Image (cartoon, coloured by chain):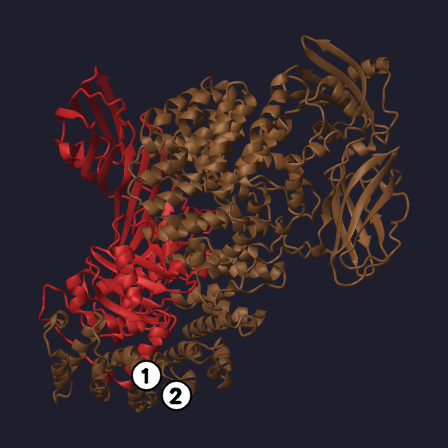
Amino acid sequence: MIGGLFIYNHKGEVLISRVYRDDIGRNAVDAFRVNVIHARQQVRSPVTNIARTSFFHVKRSNIWLAAVTKQNVNAAMVFEFLYKMCDVMTAYFGKISEENIKNNFVLIYELLDEILDFGYPQNSETGALKTFITQQGIKSQEPYGCGTSHLQHQTKEEQSQITSQVTGQIGWRREGIKYRRNELFLDVLESVNLLMSPQGQVLSAHVSGRVVMKSYLSGMPECKFGMNDKIVIDKQGKGAATDDSAKSEMGGSSGKQSIAIDDCTFHQCVRLSKFDSERSISFIPPDGEYELMRYRTTKDIILPFRVIPLVREVGRTKLEVKVVIKSNFKPSLLAQKIEVRIPTPLNTSGVQVICMKGKAKYKASENAIVWKIKRMAGMKESQISAEIELLPTNDKKKWARPPISMNFEVPFAPSGLKVRYLKVFEPKLNYSDHDVIKWVRYIGRSGIYETRC
Amino acid sequence: MTDSKYFTTTKKGEIFELKAELNSDKKEKKKEAVKKVIASMTVGKDVSALFPDVVNCMQTDNLELKKLVYLYLMNYAKSQPDMAIMAVNTFVKDCEDPNPLIRALAVRTMGCIRVDKITEYLCEPLRKCLKDEDPYVRKTAAVCVAKLHDINAQLVEDQGFLDTLKDLISDSNPMVVANAVAALSEIAESHPNSNLLDLNPQTINKLLTALNECTEWGQIFILDCLANYTPRDDRESQSICERVTPRLSHANSAVVLSAVKVLMKFMEMLPKDLDYYGTLLKKLAPPLVTLLSAEPELQYVALRNINLIVQKRPEILKHEMKVFFVKYNDPIYVKLEKLDIMIRLASQANIAQVLAELKEYATEVDVDFVRKAVRAIGRCAIKVEQSAERCVSTLLDLIQTKVNYVVQEAIVVIKDIFRKYPNKYESVIATLCENLDSLDEPEARAAMIWIVGEYAERIDNADELLESFLEGFHDESTQVQLQLLTAIVKLFLKKPTETQELVQQVLSLATQDSDNPDLRDRGYIYWRLLSTDPVAAKEVVLAEKPLISEETDLIEPTLLEELICHIGTLASVYHKPPSAFVEGSRGVQHKRLPPRSGSGESTESPEVGQPGGTGPEATPAVIPSQSDLLGDLLNLDLGPPASGSVPAPTSGMQMGAMDLLGSGLDTLMGDDSEPLGGDIGGSPAMGAGFGGAPAVMPASLNAPVGGGLGDLFDLGSSMGMTTGAYVAPKSVWLPAMKAKGLEISGTFSRRAGVIQMELSLTNKAMSIMTDFAIQFNRNSFGLAPAGPLQVLTPLSPNQTIEVSLPLNTVGPVMKMEPLNNLQVAVKNNIDVFYFSCQYPISILFVEDGKMERQVFLATWKDITGENEAQFQIKDCHLNSDAASSKLQSSNMFTVAKRTVDAQDMLYQSMKLSNNIWVLAELRLQAGSPNYTLSLKCRAPEVSQYVFQCYETVLKN
């Protein structure tokens, strides 16, 4: 298991050093600094073995976090733990920076003592930790906001409630949460990735999506989440039973279309065995914001934009570029933050651009023409044409013509995913599913959205 | 007020000041002081002098202060054991505290204080805490047992903590179960033989139940523990798999990988025809792909594991090539790993896409990545034959870029492509030669030299090229020197007239001026070879090289199995067994995959393979690695160190060398096209080895290595035994290891119409062996012993006897795969042993196999083209008469001979013992070492075996 955990600043000075195992000595701290942080070349691997000691590291801005071990540990677990630790620290005191770490080193030691015992990760859910590690993090902006409350003021009931939560089946939520207004927000965030050939043939396309939930619900609510998953819809279609609850109550979708999900993963609150057997997503949510699920689809993706490039070489010193973009979604919807990046050769000497919409500029430092459009409705078309003057070179190597890339944001899910329902049951408290105010939002963003030219 | 100020106190007299503050009456001041102490401790200052003062602060209600003091204690208790004892009372008291958090804190901290005296006091509180009513305390106590075990294992056993820990597996709280499992697994690792974690179906069931309920980390502990269990049968295996598969949808990648580990391991037990097996395979792909959208460090871990999984079960990800395409922003370690997997998944179906990608990568910035991409193109050419042409042209394009490292890398891979597809792409040599001057890396230089030497006859100025390298011979690396030596010897053998001086120059450079024993020895061997018998030298140096395999860098199967059992862990990241990087007793146990059920009678794992004697062909030729490919002669795994085996003193050698070489030359130069009559005694595989071929020796050669070398040195004496049918040398059929000390090696022959099985029985055990008997399984041609095995005297230890067992062909018939496979059972007083061997089909050729000319013609026409098979026999230097007489001695008769346009055609016939006729046409082109053999037979399945006979007879 993890033998020790060190945090360094960019100079390699150690900010936090916690050793869990006897086989890790002080010299390990220096070994990592000398061999990794101070090494001149680029980092070639996140796992380094120095003198039979293995170092796992991740970097957050200019802070290095390193876990050390001499055993054959579960490497995936160590990295997951390091990420989790970053999350916990962020939740307590904001951005991970040298200043914040120095300001909160006592808190960090306390956290490390709790979430890692003899190198074994323990409950690391911020929700649970905050019930008994109550030092408030000190954010660099507010240096006087110091407050510590102490456990000895807790009643016996409170104490046992804490321990049962930390060790219990629902370690991510504490009991006794109360809201006057029960409310929840669902964000379906997708990033759509595309690689298209100059002829408009899709070489590869996939959507990776996340469902992020913000829940402000009282008590221990039992939630059930439904979407237009092909497997579920097909099953219901076969049964021909018109399940009333299956009717859309939020998304406004008719439930006719369904999507094939390649794979999905869930927050630990979701009962996986139930998903495996019935494909239903049921859970007791953590309080506040968290990521309910991630998914990936590759079939029937709505590509919000089509890029049609035309590059013509006029002699040896001139290039003519014409790029048409077409928006491919309902005319009533608006895409935002559209940016098209057209690469130019290294020996470009001058560029003249004419565009119908938005603003376009040649950025010599980036070797590209950047064309920005603030908003664009669906089923529209726009065009840019540019003349690129080239310096004559004797470089034999031909220009490799990097792909044209695009950025945008659209108010729908390119995968076609629709939220069908999110039902809330809280048997002990007197509020029902209908009393909960629910919000759903769909945002599709470009991932790597490229068209070769 | 922030904590960062504690880092900045660097005044002198600091310790003194701190001491005063620690003893202050004010609580706040005390706390501040302890914080300063901890800060100093963190940055590495020695604050152990403050030990008593800090410990004094321990008795406090302030939990934050208490935690700080504990932190200090954990760090310094070891250096101040006597003082540490002061803290014991507080610990014991805290373990009784009404607040479970404080009880847990105390027991957790106590376990971290590695002072013997304290450990003794720890036992009682620990015992209580293990049975505490609060699960939080119990889960902390469970880990504490592991801590204590690390300090004093004996104490833990004596106090019976292990049993308590085992009981905790049945605890009602899932987190307690998970920590107990983690603690037990760790303790069990240092006691490899204890059945501490005696996993049985009941405990497994408990673990699987807890799996659904505990934290993500707990799930990892449980899954990792499950992976060590071996289910009793395939049904149990399936039911566990069913309960583990839901974990594949967990957001935590480590949970997913640990679940994959369990599934990969247990899948091994499921019968392949089971529906569930297929379902499981399908379920594994999506989560593995999803891992690639995790953070880069986790992607790296996932990719290293996928690399293993793809080698073990390529079917899982064979359709997922695209997800391994490199993204522009991937960190370099992710890029390199993706590239590796892309090559493994490359197949005919996706090669076009892969190649297009690789071409893009070859223009990137990172040098390592570009090199690997270029190398990958070469590997694709070797792996997917249909793409070879495109790959070669891509490589040529890349060479045109003149980017130095790209050119060098391309030349290295083109050399491999030449090896794989001889006589196909040599037209590009001219382009390669243009870049000769830009090569500055040893590997590329060596590759280029190899190409020049290998194709010396097609390169007009080969001698000039090689000579240019020779100028700086001593500045070259060993790899290049060795290659240069071999290349010049090859050149000399091909163009003896013009290159005499060159070869003498290189030989003397290698033998006289070099300090490198490898180089010197290779030089001497060539020298001797050339001077003793240039014809033999030609056979040896220019021997046909074994084909190179398609897959490279494959992990050796047993290691792969072990690594599969370690999926997710460091071992799978390093691709090394834990014993390679873990000190001490931990991880020394080698994990193995469970045997597949359903193959009840065989307890061997499937990888162990067939028993010995399957012949050298059975050993696949693998390129061990790029550098070994051009490896030196002495790396040939020859067992005894060969450096001492060239006895000639340097000076004497020099004296004789001149004229020895001269006399040898005459033979070579006399008439190059003259048939090279006579046999060479050295085994063909040895010869191939000397030609610069990879250092993989056929298994059968491992034993008689010394002899092999000897043969080389007196090649002359073993020549001229052309009479009689060729009999293959004996090979080991049954190694002693598998037969309780009895080693059997043997071969087959046909003498005077009787098939003989020649056996050597060697007793390698300590006791005498008697009562030998032999029996055959039914086989394709009804071979059966004609009499009992004649071993009359008991076989004493270390004794070998030779037995000839006459065989007849009247036994029961059953078609075997391969056709010439023979399964044999040998019994002695100890046990019955089974092995299988393959016989040359020529032993079945009967003496009256010569067909009448007319009948031959009619039959030849009669047999349809479907039943005709064509083969190439390469590098054979016999003329038609010599070939004919050689074949005749093996009952392969020449019916007629025809000569058309300098092409000799031999029409031949042979008859098998079961009256199957085989007709043959052997075409010999004057001046070409390659023969074409067409076989017609009404039972076409024998053709291949007949061809093998042709090859062995003609080449031996």
Q: In this rendering, is residue B98 above or below B578?
A: below
Task: Residue B593: give x, y in percent of width and height.
Answer: 57, 57
Q: From what the image shows, is residue B106 above or below residue B920? A: below
Q: Using the image as rendered, state which of residue B156 and residue B329 is in the foreground.
A: B156
Q: Quadrant of the N terminus of chain A?
A: bottom left
Q: Nearer the viewer, residue A238 or B440?
A: B440
Q: Residues within 10 Å of mark 1 (few under 14, many from 20)?
A: many
Q: Residue at x 50, y 43 (%)?
A: B517
Q: Amino acid at mark 1?
A: Ala
Which chain did the image draw in brown? B
Which residue is painted at 71% across and 44% down in the image?
B613
Secondary structure found at label 2: helix
Residue B546: x and y in percent read 59, 34
How would you rate the neighbour count of disc 2 (Cα within 10 Å): few for under 14, some for 14-19, many for 20 or more?
many
The red chain is: A
* Residue, disc 2: B125
Question: Are the two marked residues, 1 and 2, in contact with CB atoms closer than 8 angstroms?
Answer: yes
Instruction: Residue at the far top: name it.
Output: B901
Q: Which mark is residue B106?
A: 1
- Residue displayed at 88% across by 25% down: B848
SS for callout 1: helix
Q: Badge 1 sits on which subunit?
A: B
Distance CA(mark 1)–CA(mark 2): 9 Å
User: In what quadrant of the picture does the C terminus of chain A appear?
Assistant: top left
Is B309 or A135 nearer to us in this picture?
A: B309
Percent coordinates x, y for residue B384 in the rendering: 50, 32
Residue A435's disc number: none
